[in-house]
Image: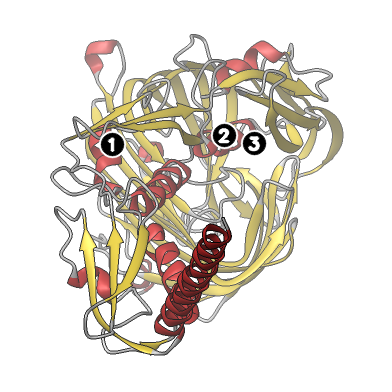
Amino acid sequence: MRGVGMLLDSFNVSMRLKTVLLVTTALLCVVANESAFGQAREVSEIKFVGLKHIPPENLTHVLSVKVGDVLIEEDLRERLTNDMDKLWQLGFFARRPEFFYEVDERGRWVVTIRLVEHAVVKEIIIEGNTAIATEEILSVMSTKVDQILNKAVLARDIERIRELYRDKGFLGDVESLDFEETTGKLKLKLIEARITAINFAGLKKTKEKILRMVLLTKVGDLFNQKRLAEDWRRLSNLGLFKSIEIETRPDESGNGIAVTYKIEEQRTGMASAGIGASSRGEFVGYIMLQENNLGGLAQKLRLGAEFFERKTWEIYYERPYVNSRGLMLSTHIYNTRFYREPRTAWLISPQQWVLQDTLFTEEREGIRLTLRQPRSKEDRRTWYTLGLRNEDVSFAQRRYVGGTLQEVGPTQSQGRVMAVQFGYERDTRDIQFDPSRGQNSIFNIEIATKVLGGDHSFARTYIEWRFYRPIGKGTLKVTRELQIPRSLIAVRLMCGTAIGDLPIFENYFAGGPENLRGYSIDRFVGKHMIVLNTELRYRLNPNVQLVLFGDSGDAWGGKYAVDFEALLRGVEKRRTSMEPKYGYGVGVRFATPLGLIRFDYAINDEGKSKFHVSIG
């Protein structure tokens, strides 16, 4: 038994020795392994696993770990972790990149990066777009068919789509996107903001229904900032409001836009009466009633009369928006008197030339009907006009004798004029009453014929072009919606010509504040006319402007266009060709409810000067 015990003790000692040896060996292996990974080692290889379409060299430049770097494990792991962030941000991969590393047989680092690429885009589907065509949306996207999907690029594409909508005045966004990795189908679903309510605040006289006819934007339409700006311009051009502000906000549902027009109305009615002496030495009384917003429907009515030595009257009525398209109707019934002041005139009786202090008293009694139709509901900048004129005309020739205006010969009837007018107008001005930019082009042709019952047959053509452009960067704030330039250039070109049996009162006249400043009103007369006006305008404030101007032009042709200088020499000679006349000067403009009141001081090319006052 004693021998057995000794054997057992010997066995236990042996087992303990083996256990110690095993533990010691394990510890030595761990220490050895830690020594292997803890020491600085060279990176011998970087392998990419899972690439199908992306060349490895396109990725290595992103990594901070390079082949040949000598790194300890801690630095290697930290750099690779950061590099995985960089690779993920490239946008090419469906899952976040992963890495692992090991030591090769020569004691160097071998790095393996596992990647899962997005599929190649085989089809791009755009849904929900109504404002902008799919082709135009695709054209701004960098993501293309037959390219590997890149979510970073796609994110930039979404911002480009938003910007495309903003540039066109819309509000649009990508509501959702889906990419099927198995089929390569990329689907973008867009959402576009729509107008869900249009409200008006501040109206007292004007009816909402006429304003809703004026507006281009309707409830249910896509929200469009440019269309709202056009609506602001349309409302402003009614001439009924002091200020208009547009407020936009999300509606209660959060899915649409509610628009509110905050309007301050201005006085639209005017009544005046008076008694006085005219510049012609006449004792005149007058009365005028005018309303520019009759019934709150933007209708215009003007009643006017003069009495005592000058007896005239007129009734003018204008109704806009006769139909939803924007047809405008105007009627003018009148018995009026005009004064014409050509420098030379052929006396009615006796037939001789007078050289100064001569004028015509021109009386017209009749009616004019005019229809103006815009090209469409959307395009109310292009207008077509049809007009009818039926009037009797007579005139007496007068001159100053001893400071008194006296008739020279009897009043002469010139018969009836029956004419039809066709017109075209293209108006891109921002504000019609005091524009800062844009153009206005007018073409009219009027045909008078005996076939319609008149006493004369002739045709007159008239062309007018206006141009406005800001200069400099200075602006004035008028309202929250409107800022106007301080300085601008304004140009107007007028051309007219006539053929046929043209009575004197249907000739063109040049001279005076409306065309050729520096000369007397109607100084030049003829069957043809060209006048060019150029102005440099500077606004001191929204209601006051300073002006430098230059005018050039002439009226010539026909039996009434006489060469005044030749006549002074006793030679009767017709002015058969244009001889441009010039005027230049300074002026000031005041904006009023009646329109612009203009004061101009001009000097002509004969060295004489004139002071002009006009309205409009």
- Residue 85 found in image quarter: bottom left
Give the CA distance from mark 1 to mark 2: 39 Å
First of labels 1, 3 by sequence position: 3
Residue toward you, 468 or 8: 8
Q: Is residue 56 left or right of residue 511?
A: left
Q: Quadrant of the N terminus?
A: bottom right
Residue toward you, 187 or 62: 62
Residue marked by disc 3: 236
Q: Is residue 316 visible?
A: no
Q: Is residue 402 visible?
A: yes
First of labels 2, 3 by sequence position: 2
Residue marked by disc 2: 228
Above or below, 540 relative to 245: below
Residue marked by disc 1: 460
Q: Residue at x 43, y 40 (%)?
A: 165
* Amino acid type, mark 3: Ser
Please, what secondary structure does the residue beneath circle 1 have? strand
* Amino acid type, mark 2: Leu
**Proximity of marks 2 and 3: CB atoms separated by less than 8 Å:** no
Front disc: 2 or 3: 2
* Amino acid type, mark 1: Arg
Residue toward you, 449 or 225: 225
